[in-house]
Every structure is written in C-alpha cells, then in structure tokens.
Amino acid sequence: MADSEINILIIEDNKEQAMALAMYAKGKKYQPKIAYDTTIGLMMLQQFRIDLVILDLGLPGGGGFFVLENMKKSYKTYDIPIVVLTAKIEEGLEQKAREKGVVEYFVKPCPMEKLFGAIDAILRPPSG
Amino acid sequence: MAFRTKEVFEKELRLLVWELRDNPYRRFFVAFMLIWAIPFLTILYLVIYGRERASESSILSTLLILSLLLVVSIGGAVLALRMLDNILNKLVAYFIRAKRQDELKSRFVATVSHELKSPLMTLQTNNSNLLEGFAGPITEEQRTIVETCRNVINRMDEMIFAILDLYKIESGMVSLTIDRCDAAHLLRSQQSEMSSLFGQKEIQLISKIPSGEFPVRWDGSRMSIVFNNLLSNALKYTPEKGTVSILLEPLDDYVKIEIQNTGEQIPRENLEVIFARFEKLHPEVEGYGLGLAISRDIVEAHGGLIWAESYPSKNCFIIYIPREARKTNG
C-alpha cells in the first residue's frame, strides 16, 4: 500500500482544529478526511476505506464513545485503529476508552510530533 | 491541611442539620432539652430536697413555682423551636450555597479544560504546520517568530495543566491510585532525569538514598510530580557550583525525605508563603508559583506533611509521609 493511499478519518467538531490536523496529516503524506459529528463520521467509515481514526470524545450526536461502540459492532470497522485526541480530563476516561479498543490516547494540547509519532508507529511500522 | 479539617467539620454539621430538619420529633426533643433542662433540674431539686421539710405552705409554694415554671418552659420551648428552625434554615441555605459553589468549581475545571485546551491545540497544530513547512516554505526570520510562538504556547499549556491539577486535587476530583512502589527508585529516576540540567549549572548533586528497594504504598506518579517540583525548585534557586542534597530516611511507619540546597536563605516569614498558590519570592525566576502548592496538596492527600526550613545560605524542604498512604481526599 503506497503511503498516499493511507486514509485517516478525523472526527472532530472544532472546524479549525480538524482543518489544522488535516493539513498536518497531508504534510505527513496521509490522506485525511474530516467528519464534524458522529453521524457523518460513522457514515464515512462505512463509505470509505479508512485506515485509522483520530477521534475527539466531546462530539455532538452522542459523543466519541457512541462512535467507538458503533465501530466495534460493525464488521467493516471493528478492527480500524482508533487514536483518541480529547480535551476531557475526567479520571478514568482513558481506561474506559482503552477498554473499548482505543490504541492510543492523547489529551489536548498534544505536540504533533507525539501524536503523529504514534500514528506512524501504527500505520508505518518499521519493517524488519 | 486546615481546609480539610474544616471540610470534615462541615460534613458532620451538615449531616446533623439534615437529620434535624428531616425529623420533627428529634427537632422538638432538642428544643425541649435546650429549654427544659434548667427548670427540670430545679423541679427535681425542689421535689427531692424539699420533701424532707415539707409543710402545707411549702407544698403550695412548690406547686405554684412548678406551674409557673411549666408555663414559662412551654413558652420557652415553642420559642426555642422557632429559633432552632430559623438556625436550621440558615444552615441549610448555607450548605446549599456551598454545594452550588462546589458545582461551580467543578464546572470551572471542565470549562478551563475544554475552552482553553482546545484552542491551544489548534494553535499548536497550526504552529507545527508552519514549522514543518506544510503550509508552504517559510524564511528563517519567520521560523524564529513561529518558534517564539511555540514556546509561549508550551508555557500556556504548562500553566493550564498546573491549574487544573491543583483544582482537581483540591476538589477531590482526583482519587489517589495507591499502589506498591519503590520510593528510592522514584527519587533516583527524578534525579537522573534532571542530572544533565544540574550539570549545566555545575551544581553538585549529593544523593543520600539507601541502596536497594524502599517499598512504600503511594500514588507513585503523583509523588514523582512532588519530587520533580522540589528538584526543579532546587535547580532554579541554587547558584552555579552550589550543592543539592537528596535524603531518604526511614522513621518507623513514616519516611522522611529532604531536599536541601545551598543558596540565598528564604526569609523565615516567607517559609509558609511559598506554599500558597501563585506566590513567588523571585518574580524574575521562571514558573507560576504553583509547584509547591500542588506538592503540598499531594503530600497531604497521602496523609503526610511538607514544610520548608531555612538556614544561613541553605534551604531545606522536608516531607514526612506514611509508608502506607492514608487517603484523605475523595
């Protein structure tokens, strides 16, 4: 799979944030797609081949956990790696998200090098 | 620790007030006890000791006094009941207000978290886009400006993190995760993380940590924050070629940890001031004056104590903390 074909879906209700993330992803030679709420996000997950999801937890339309639960129910989406990027700081939230299958969890603001370092490790693991 | 004692007292008082408010019989009993105690004892006295020298006139006068006292007592009890109701209502209003303030505090934390952290993330992402050249090439001069912005963003991030941590600990939103950990390892790892920074200032780092394991039951990650804060302070305030000593000493069920540094003596009158939020004795030194406040909260949440002592050209920060932490918050 060529790098340019790696699709990342950014589910984030803050438009400026989503656009900035998409620009960075594009700079890192990924193909970003944006969904501003849970419904559109789930619809895009069914419509496109998505390789990784960057998910905000404080989303309109049920929140990030609604997306997580629905992704795990669908044969097409259950094994897509999910990276959470949230401003929520409630105790125990990370553990709850990881129990639902989240592979990486970051609290905003998070340096891009750290976020995309983890994404690279998932999508472009060092060969050999 | 003072605010916690107040909290415990308030909690007990609140329980008492709620119990009295919800139980009219108990409320009447309290009013009765308050007003009837004195007349009741007088009657008892008259009945027991007056009987020995009883005559017709004394029985009559006793009855008269008794009936008078009865009337006064009933009136008094009714009055006391009203007063008690009034006090109870005021206390209930006070507690409702306090609860609302607690809710506002929690909401403040959530607001700070979301409303400040999210835009900061956007700034940080766009800053990275500029620095990486993802938004087009930039000149060296522009790069310097963008890098300055990045440093400011990072400092804001640190400050928001520190404020949130403080509020989370104080409002009991954070429950300590007490687990078995190695106190010596926690101190040693903080020491080695910062050793290069101490080296840059040619500060001599003396470690008096016993070799081997030193098992304790603490929240390891939070205690690491405390050690990091104390060592960062030592780094900031120790002059070049000075000395910083780290001491770990077992004391029965407690552990004594001491961080000493050479340098300008902290004035005695400021030894407590430095533990207050946003208090900095030297405004020119980097930081927000939150580190020691956070450290004190964490240590006290473990059931320990932290304080500072100062001597001519030397300052010490001392922690007394139980080996097995007792949770005092949450």
Image (cartoon, coloured by chain):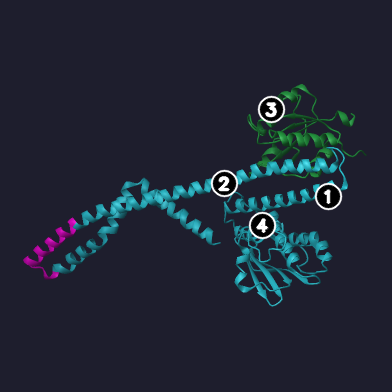
Chain colours: A green, B cyan
Label 3 and label 4 in one chain = no
Task: Say which residue appears at 25% left-offset and 54% top-offset.
Answer: B77
Q: Nearer the viewer, residue B1 or B41?
A: B1
Reading the image, the residue beneath label 4 is B218
Q: CA distance from mark 4 to mark 2?
A: 25 Å
The amino acid pointed to by label 1 is: Thr
Reading the image, the residue beneath label 2 is B106
Q: Nearer the viewer, residue B119 or B224?
A: B119
Instruction: Locate residue A20 relative to residue B217 in the image: left or right.
Output: right
Whether the residues at callouts 4 and 2 have beta carbons within 8 Å, the answer is no
Residue B227 part of the magenta-drawn span: no
Reading the image, the residue beneath label 3 is A70
Residue B144 is marked as: 1
Please say if B106 is above or below B202: above
What is the chain identity of the residue bearing mark 3? A
The amino acid pointed to by label 3 is: Asn
Q: Which portion, as a residue range, is magenta?
A: B52-71
Q: Secondary structure at mark 4?
A: strand
Specify whether residue B225 is in view: yes
What is the chain identity of the residue bearing mark 1? B
Q: Quadrant of the N terminus of chain B?
A: bottom right
